[in-house]
Image (spheres, rainbow, N blue to C red):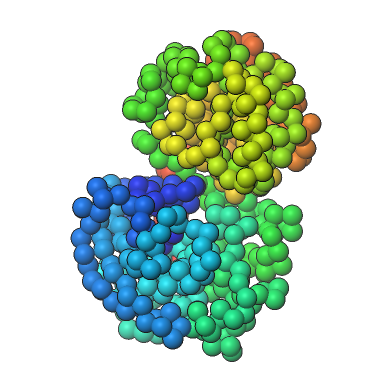
Amino acid sequence: MNILFAASEAVPYSASGGLGEVAGSLPKAIAERGHNCAVVIPMYKSISDEMRIHMEFVANITVDVSWRKQYCGIFKAKKNGIVYYFIDNEYYFNRNGMYGFYDDCERFVFFARAVMEMLKHIGFKPDIISCNDWQTALIPVYYQLYYKYQQGYDRLKITFTIHNIEYQGKYGSEVLGEIMGIAPYNSGLLEYDGCMNMLKGAIETVDRIITVSPGYAKELLDPWYAHGLDRLLVTKQDKLTGILNGIDMDMYNPEIDPYIPENYNKDDFSGKEVCKKRLLEELGLESGDEPVIGIVTRIVKHKGIDLIRSMFEQILKNGVKFAVLGSGERIYEEFFIEMARRYPDRVSVTMEYNPERARRIYAGSDMFLMPSMSEPCGIAQMIAMRYGTIPIVRKTGGLKDTVRDNGGMNGNGFTFLTYNAGDMFDAICRAISDYENKPKWKELIRRAMYCDFSWEKSAKTYIDMFEEMICE
């Protein structure tokens, strides 16, 4: 099969979170099983000169953005056996940052149309296009309206993966004709609750809807989690499925990781103590055997930061230290900065995405806290367990699918059910209690490190689904 993955980011070229990780690692996993995979992403300013050196110019074309015709350059490069295509337009993508601009609607309308036009010029004819999140949601809409019956586009199947339904690409009705170039009589494909909703357009027009964990697929039928789209998704259950994300087990491997001070493995994890000691030194925290709780996340509400904030000082009274890394909403950033000022020997805060330090926090922490309000899949808890750091999570979405509570002595972490600060605190206290029993804690580390979070099983599920779609 030929499979094209369309995403707004993908490692190793650009990433701001889990989407970029998946868009980089899933194609690799499928390609290793004998299929031809390619990835297409925007050519962002942040892509380094060292990476650009290895890019090859393919073509330049013009792309319709409603009544405008915009320049589009197409470049490609090969990395880890995968061909990456890059959509270049300096007006749209030569900026500091990937998202959050006033014209994001127009930028990703251009990207979606460019992906469809690109297929005429790259010599790669996909059987499947795998679209990801709202930035690519218009690809299946444009295919349905303008390309389905064109020569060379026949028998193409399209999937759409919802990585986080909170972000839907919602805009006023004026964008339909002025930016998207879609006639009013087709507005029903996108119109939802009084606005143009790109995610709705994808759900209406794709062949399969995928979410990034089985648990999240069920939750999206619940108004609490679906951010208004539950009414639509309930009618599309026949094409909705949940497939758990994996992680790149080579990239996140404590046995060979060059960014941690001492390597170790699941059979001999004595090096983890060295990593903890060196992490405390790096972060300026007091030395000692007290448990270190790591937090590597976007500092936003749905990650459960309200729960952490309400119980933070109470948790500190139990003798723990915190290593926090991330950035996000200002109100939460200021809270963590204030805690680090009050407790400089116990709390470290890094308000930026620093991937090398993140690896050292994964390796040097004892516990990893993820009390998310919602978590479509989550890969941080998987990475933490890969490094022998025990997750403390709320049972939601992919966290529920990957973390088993240690109350029965055969779990790999600690869980709590309700979105409640007291329940989170109880889970943390149980973890601290088990930590003090060193033989018990070592067995828990071993169980966590023996968990298989590779793409092996999930990649096979994707392949089976793609093959089934082609035969339909």
- Residue drawn at the location 37% of the way across and 36% of the way down: 251
- Residue drawn at the location 46% of the way across and 78% of the way down: 142
User: Which quarter of the picture shows residue 342?
Assistant: top right
The N terminus lies in quadrant: bottom left
Foreground residue among 59 and 431: 59
Residue 63 at what x, y percent from top left?
36, 78
User: Which quarter of the picture shows residue 340?
Assistant: top right
User: Which quarter of the picture shows residue 95?
Assistant: bottom left
Residue 343 vertical position relative to residue 354 in the rendered view, above or below: above
> Taking 374 as reference, is 82 left or right?
left
Residue 469 at what x, y percent from top left?
45, 66
- Residue drawn at the location 74% of the way across and 30% of the way down: 311
Residue 40 vertical position relative to residue 273 in the rendered view, above or below: below
> Taking 232 as reference, is 42 left or right?
left
Foreground residue among 235 and 57: 57
> Taking 55 as reference, is 146 left or right?
right
Residue 159 vertical position relative to residue 359 in the rendered view, above or below: below
The C terminus lies in quadrant: bottom left
- Residue drawn at the location 75% of the way across and 34% of the way down: 310
Residue 47 at what x, y percent from top left?
33, 52
State the count of labels.
Answer: 0
Residue 32 vertical position relative to residue 286 in the rendered view, above or below: below
Residue 322: tell me if it is visible. no
Residue 347 at what x, y percent from top left?
60, 24
Foreground residue among 289 and 98: 98
Residue 236: tell me if it is visible. yes
